[in-house]
Amino acid sequence: MAVESQPAGLRFDRNELSGAFGDMGTDLPLLIGMLVASGLDAASVLIVFGVLQIATGIVYRMPMPVQPLKAVAAIVITQRIAPPVLFGGGLAIGVLMLLLATTGMLGWIGRAVPRPVVRGLQLGLGLQLSLLALRDYIPSLGAAGYALAVVSGGIILALFGNRKWPAAPFVIALGVIFAVATSAAPLELAAGPALALPGLRVPQWTDIVTGLLVLALPQLPLSIGNSVLATQQLARDLFPDRPALSLRRIGLTYGIMNVVAPFFGGVPTCHGSGGMAGHYAHGGRTGGSVVIYGTLFVLTGLLFSSGFHVIVQAFPLPTLGVLLLVEAIVLIALLRDLPPRVATGLPLAVMVGLIAALTPYGYLTGMVAGSLVAAAVAGRERTAIR
């Protein structure tokens, strides 16, 4: 994957439009799952999610997306967590991240975790996204879904890296044609748009404490590893000509988003290396792709929130699976710059990646185990030199 030199700023061209679809495969299933499991207000969730995307694109001026918190979403979906606890948990994790950022703890963690460990966390996320795409999304419609995935994949391979004709809009258009041809849902949706606005909510102390214990604490290790450390590293990899992002800045915007969103009915969110990889892989080079993506959510929330479930149910999962697989491949390919040293290079990253992808609390376990191995090897080497 060639890294291009691009001026910082906002652009709204065909490539930014293509990049805007790079994170759909991750975001939509999590948002829909939480909406269904908890009975959240769709207008509030969509509008707040879109506004946060727009704000992030403007602030960072690079494809720094906003994603639902994955561990939180998994707990909410499987345990059907009530909305007040979800909002309380979002507020709690926002405050925790602000504390880590403002006290300098994020910087200390960043210095303590070596680069191969960060690469391993990115690998773990790439493996998880690959499994989701190949196991759940692409096979979901049987033979027709496999055929759609093959055609979509062919389009991406043929146009990958093409700045004049980016692939994602063609893949999305193919998915829309498939949906219209196989479902009456788009016709039902067209009959009933209605303007909706989010309302003000104030989390209660009991819900904040419950959300802290049930949602925030399980999420925090994943957020530190993927949303902060891995995102900073990926931004350096993809945009080496731009000023480096500090861990403090990423932590501050992460925290602010989650302190604000619960009061307006928004789900807990984060930044993420997978989302940045998805936007970049499909053409996004500035914050324009994130602004476009957020605008789509705001318009859907304002006009079509009552039919949002219909929109997603009509759109074919194999198409989202192919987009998700591209995002995963970009993350896994980042391993190529690591040396083959057994304890501090590629093998260490692979170990961390497998732990992150396949074990409970894998991101925390992998980050700690990998850092300890790297520290032990470095200490042994210093002793041998003496």
Image: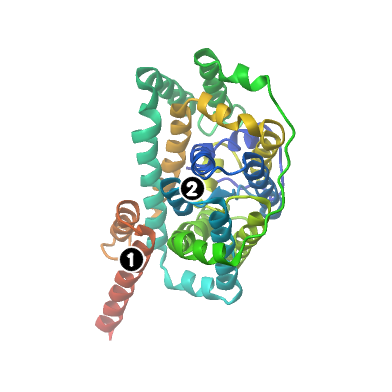
Q: Quadrant of residue 283?
A: top right
166, above or below 287, in the image: above
Dot 2: element: helix
Q: How many marks?
A: 2
- Residue drawn at x 41%, y 41% is 329
Q: Nearer the viewer, residue 235 or 317?
A: 317
Q: Which residue is mark 1?
A: 370
Sequence order check, earlier mark of 1 and 2: 2
Q: Amino acid at mark 1?
A: Gly
Label at residue 384: none
Q: Nearer the viewer, residue 239 or 261?
A: 261
Q: Which residue is mark 2?
A: 274
Q: Amino acid at mark 2?
A: Gly
- Residue drawn at x 50%, y 31% is 160
Percent x, y for residue 70?
A: 47, 50
Q: Nearer the viewer, residue 343 or 69?
A: 69
Q: Can I make out residue 270 in this image?
A: no
Q: Which image quadrant: the C terminus?
A: bottom left
Percent x, y for residue 109?
A: 47, 71
- Residue drawn at x 62%, y 65% is 252
Question: Mark 2, residues whose alpha carbon is within 10 Å: few (<14), some, or many (≥20)?
Answer: many
Dot 1: element: helix
Question: Mark 1, residues whose alpha carbon is within 10 Å: few (<14), some, or many (≥20)?
Answer: many
Percent x, y for residue 104?
A: 56, 76
194, above or below 208, in the image: above
- Residue drawn at x 33%, y 66% is 370
Q: Can I make out residue 323 in this image?
A: yes
Percent x, y for residue 373?
A: 29, 70
Instruction: Give left or right: position of 382 versus 257.
Output: left
Determine the CA span between mark 1 and mark 2: 21 Å
Residues at discs 1 and 2 in contact (Cβ within 8 Å): no
